[in-house]
Image (tube, rainbow, N blue to C red):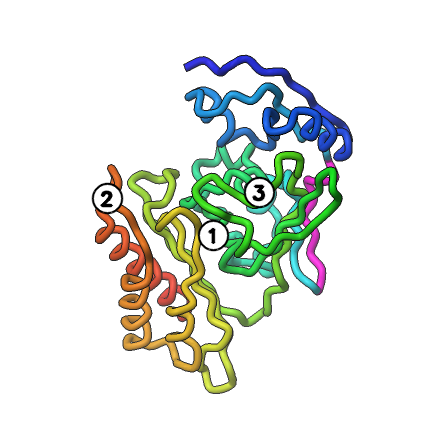
């Protein structure tokens, strides 16, 4: 289908972009990489009066690594993450997840902030943000604020962002060198959205027992979710066949899936359990 008519603006400063959003209320949309927004416009699922293109805001394209963690500029692209050798040790779970994002053409254009703002429940970056206790920094006419990822996603394609706010940065906590991690997802075709996926990381004490376990799932329900019940099973135990089996069973029991055209709820719950099981085995290997 053809896109609906709209005006276009390409500001060169963040205050200018915010002013454009504020002047148009809810009738303006931010264009970051466009890999989600453009198809939505083509199907006429949205009809904004104005598109505000952020491509000239170079300050939002940075990737910063400090002792406190990683700050991903909202306009950093997936290919920027893939090509940044520092991230392979600074946050290998992020790199592993980004490798599953769509196809390389999309990874050359899609942005971190665009994915977070779009809030597709099957997308990798929102899942990483929730699993890793990320913070989303946003700026609007009322000033700047930082929103915990756990509070940011309010439903499928719904977030806590106000109409005049723009995401400027996604902040991930520092990554210990010896931390173990795994990321697994299953899609009908390579590059499709995940029918289910799991991100896992944990630290180990001096006896090899798990501590600080984090388990998150995507593609299940209307938003990414941390599985605290599964984390409680892992903490204080060694990762062996019995522990992995308990974690898989707990995942099946606690995730809330719905029937849809692709799979039954029971299948998605089972698939989520399998993804957690595989991610744990990958982490422990």
Which secondary structure lies at badge 3? helix
Which secondary structure lies at badge 1? helix
Of the 4 image quadrants, the one containing the C terminus is bottom left
Residue 272 is drawn in which quadrant?
A: bottom left
Residue sitting nearer the eye, 67 or 21: 21
- Residue at 56%, 37% (x, y): give it: 114
Q: Is residue 64 magenta?
A: yes
Query: What residue sits right under mark 3 in the picture?
Result: 112
Of the 4 image quadrants, the one containing the N terminus is top left
- Residue extent of the magenta highlight: 58-67
Residue 62 in picture, x, y percent from top left: 70, 44
Residue sitting nearer the eye, 54 or 229: 229
Q: CA distance from mark 2 to mark 3?
A: 28 Å
Q: CA distance from mark 1 to mark 3?
A: 12 Å
Query: What residue sits right under mark 2 in the picture?
Result: 263
Query: What residue sits right under mark 1 in the picture?
Result: 127
Q: Is residue 143 magenta?
A: no
Residue 66 in picture, x, y percent from top left: 71, 60
């Amino acid at each position: 289908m053809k896109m609906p008519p709209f005006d276009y603006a390409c500001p060169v400063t963040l205050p200018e972009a915010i002013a454009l959003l504020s002047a148009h209320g809810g009738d303006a949309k931010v264009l970051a990489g466009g890999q989600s927004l453009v198809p939505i416009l083509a199907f006429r699922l949205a009809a904004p009066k104005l598109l505000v293109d952020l491509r000239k805001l170079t300050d939002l394209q940075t990737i910063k690594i400090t002792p406190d963690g990683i700050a991903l500029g909202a306009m950093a692209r997936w290919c920027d993450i893939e090509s940044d050798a520092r991230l392979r040790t600074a946050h290998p779970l992020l790199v592993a997840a980004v490798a599953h994002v769509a196809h390389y053409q999309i990874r050359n254009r899609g942005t971190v902030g665009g994915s977070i703002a779009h809030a597709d429940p099957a997308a990798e970056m929102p899942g990483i943000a929730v699993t890793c206790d990320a913070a989303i920094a946003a700026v609007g006419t009322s000033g700047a604020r930082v929103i915990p990822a756990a509070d940011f996603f309010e439903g499928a394609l719904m977030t806590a962002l106000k109409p005049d706010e723009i995401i400027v940065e996604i902040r991930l906590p520092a990554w210990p060198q010896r931390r173990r991690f795994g990321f697994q997802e299953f899609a009908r075709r390579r590059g499709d959205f995940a029918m289910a996926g799991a991100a896992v990381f944990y630290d180990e004490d001096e006896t090899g027992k798990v501590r600080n376990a984090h388990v998150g799932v995507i593609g299940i329900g209307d938003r990414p979710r941390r599985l605290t019940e599964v984390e409680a099973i892992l903490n204080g135990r060694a990762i062996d066949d019995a522990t992995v089996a308990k974690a898989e069973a707990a995942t099946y029991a606690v995730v809330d899936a719905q029937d849809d055209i692709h799979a039954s709820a029971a299948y998605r719950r089972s698939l989520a359990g399998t993804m957690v099981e595989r991610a744990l085995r990958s982490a422990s290997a």
